[in-house]
Amino acid sequence: MKKIYLFAFLFGFSALYSQDVPLPRGLSEAEKTMIAWEQFTTPALSIGITSPPPYPVRHMAEWEELQALAITWRSFPEILTQIVLHAALEVKVVIFCKDDTVKTTAEIGLQVAGANLANVEFVVTPNNSIWIRDYGPNCIYKNDVEELNFIDWVYNRPRPEDDLLPVDAADYFGVPLYSTTENPERMVNTGGNFMSDGHGTAFASQLILGENAPGNPYNAGPHTEAEIDQIMEDYMGIDRFIKMETLPFDLIHHIDMHMRLLDEETLLVGQYPNSISDGPQIEANLKYVLDNFNSYYGTPYKVVRVVQPPDYNGFYPPYGDYRTYTNSVFVNKTILVPIYEEKYDTAALRVYREQFPGCKVAGINCNDIISLSGALHCITKEIGTADPLWITHQRHPDVLDNDLQTGGYTISANIKHKTGIAGATVYYTTDTTSAYLPLPMQATGTANEWVCYIPHQANGSDVFYYISGTSNTSKTTIRPLAAPAGYYKFHVEQLVSDANESTQAAMQAIYPNPANGITVVPVKSTSAVQASIELTDVLGQKVLTLFSGQLQSGEMRHYFDASRLSKGIYFVKLQTAAGVASQKVVVK
């Protein structure tokens, strides 16, 4: 691949980037003038294959296995050094440097810091800014798992060298590059405003609609929403593109500043105090998603909340920096999380550790960079493995003690490799200090599905398990990647039964717990039954009635807003004619 530079207006761009002054994640004042002049596309055009891939493709989820993490060494060397120190213990770190001087400086600095330089590679190529998330290559796989490809969009900043970097990345990794850079499919998009579940569902703000609308300065389209959706499906395999209202005080309108996917059915969403900053719009967007969309597995999305902290002076946007904990990075068994002040950081790091047991959760101080509207996710880009063994699994829910299928609790996973799967195993235990017991999985013959049954466990048990798959070329992958230190978990529930055992109802695990916002109370019943669900304080006084009436057969979810409650300990009580089951909830 080669680069083509068109030299009109080149002098203006050269002057702008002649000094390494950190560019914001948004537009600088000088760049706003360039956008107004519609000089955006003049200096350079990104090159790749400018037609869609000729085969079905799947966009990679960020938690899948990586071969590398890519960064651009421009500014904030302390933060970049910390990223490399942690990431190079997991994967190769590829550092794009604008010239040999930068390469030498970075190499010496990392060596002094004690980085694993055996797992670091430097690529000298022109670039304008540190924000590789927004302009870097996007990973897709041919036929789900067969071949790694890159996708390149038009970058929504007048930074021609950044916009060309995916060409060099494709050359370095030796993969095909498909580009939405020529009309009629020329489309503007940005990586921080995009995340997907690996199964064809993606999220973004409505920024993507405005930047491809009639009159846009990027010479894109223009495109209707339906046309944007079609381009995303053709190039990336996205067949459901969920777009939310932009936030009033996040001026770049990138969703990674306030939310991220933790897995196929779990959303991590930032939370502000009542009526503060972007809180009202975030809550409205969350309600829109929960009311209109289910996860890939057909279940309601689970929601985990993390508090968006104020700045050092106690101010929230627009008066303070846009501090965020959702701007994190998955690097196989390590998760990098931005941190700011210990009094806020402790709770945020605990959220990640609770969601990803066994993973290394490393906090990196981002106070120096957050004023430019970005943190760790914004300055990194995941590069998927070239040989994926793809295991997807819906975590087993908490169960009723007698909720058994033939042989036990059903564990099912889709397991796929380009050479086929030689075998798969579930490992389980009820005590993580003891050995895991292996259970061979059997192929069902349907859609790469493998299944086994964990034996019945005593009421009140916690069951921990993980899944291993081996390809016909002897590659083995486990899920979660941090297993056996990491695991999936379900609980065998307390029952509320009538006298003749004909009706059984149970509360499943309340989440999030501790709670500080929208809190979910899942309930499961074997048949319709009169019931009430109440929230009480520690003295047993009723605080809220969550439900009263006939509880229907099946699974239901009830909600309360913990942000409206005083901090402390509460109990949720499920009562039927047969008795009462309760769970403790901590409101923080």
Image (cartoon, grey):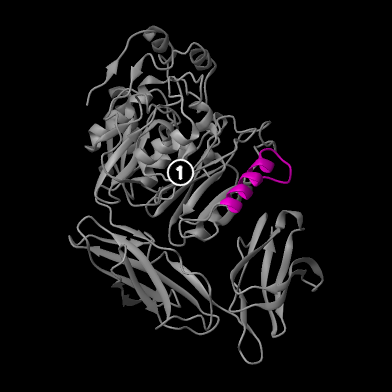
The residue positioned 69% from the left and 36% from the top of the image is: 315
Residue that label 1 marks = 195
Which region is colored magenta? 272-292
Q: Work out whether 302 lies above or below 367.
A: below
Can the viewer see residue 263 in this picture? yes
Position of 289 with respect to 164 (left or right) is right
Q: Position of residue 353 (x, y in %)?
A: 50, 58
Identify which amino acid the numbered label 1 is placed on. Answer: Met
Q: In which quarter of the image is residue 72?
A: top left
Quadrant of the drawing holding the C terminus: bottom right
Q: In which quarter of the image is residue 427?
A: bottom left
Can the viewer see residue 78 in this picture? no
Q: What element carries label 1?
A: strand
- The residue closer to the viewer here, 180 or 22, is 180
Q: Work out whether 301 lies above or below 111.
A: below
Position of 62 with respect to 460 (left or right) is left
